[in-house]
Amino acid sequence: MCKLDVSVSVFLELQALARTEEPAELKSAFNKFGQEILLSWNMQDEDGQTISADADGFLSLPPAIATEILKAWSEAVGGTGED
């Protein structure tokens, strides 16, 4: 579960950070998402241990999964432009 009711400012900031290829800015986007947007989930690591639904947990995900979560959230908040 993620927070969808965010300000335009937060949405645009995450969009800008997520579009960069600069590792420090990507880490900042993932960290912000984990701290301010992520509310809960049922993610587990390969050993079956629960991954915390916070910035540390989000930063522990494989990059492809973290990127897809951020992309799906962005589409849910900003819309895809399709009716």
Image (tube, helix red, strand yellow):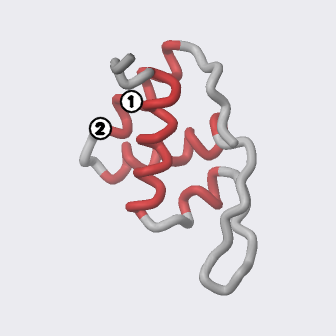
Q: Is residue 9 above or below residue 56?
A: above
What kind of residue is marked 2? Arg
Q: Residues within 10 Å of mark 2 (few under 14, many from 20)?
A: few
C-alpha gap between disc 1 and disc 2: 6 Å
Residue 16 in the image: state x and y as whole percent: 34, 29
Which residue is disc 2 drawn over?
Answer: 19
Identify which residue, 4 or 35, lies in the foreground. Answer: 4
Residue in view at x 37 percent, y 35 percent: 17
Identify which residue, 8 or 1, lies in the foreground. Answer: 1
Residue 28 in the image: state x and y as whole percent: 47, 43
Which residue is disc 1 drawn over?
Answer: 15
Image quarter for residue 49?
A: bottom right
Residue in view at x 45 percent, y 21 percent: 78
State yes or no: discs 1 and 2 in contact (Cβ < 8 Å): yes
Residue 33 in the image: state x and y as whole percent: 56, 40
Name the outermost residue toward the bottom: 47
What SS does tag 1 mark?
helix
Q: Is residue 77 left or right of residue 1?
A: left
What SS does tag 2 mark?
helix
Where, quadrant-wise, is the C terminus in this rendering? top left
Residue in view at x 29 percent, y 38 percent: 19
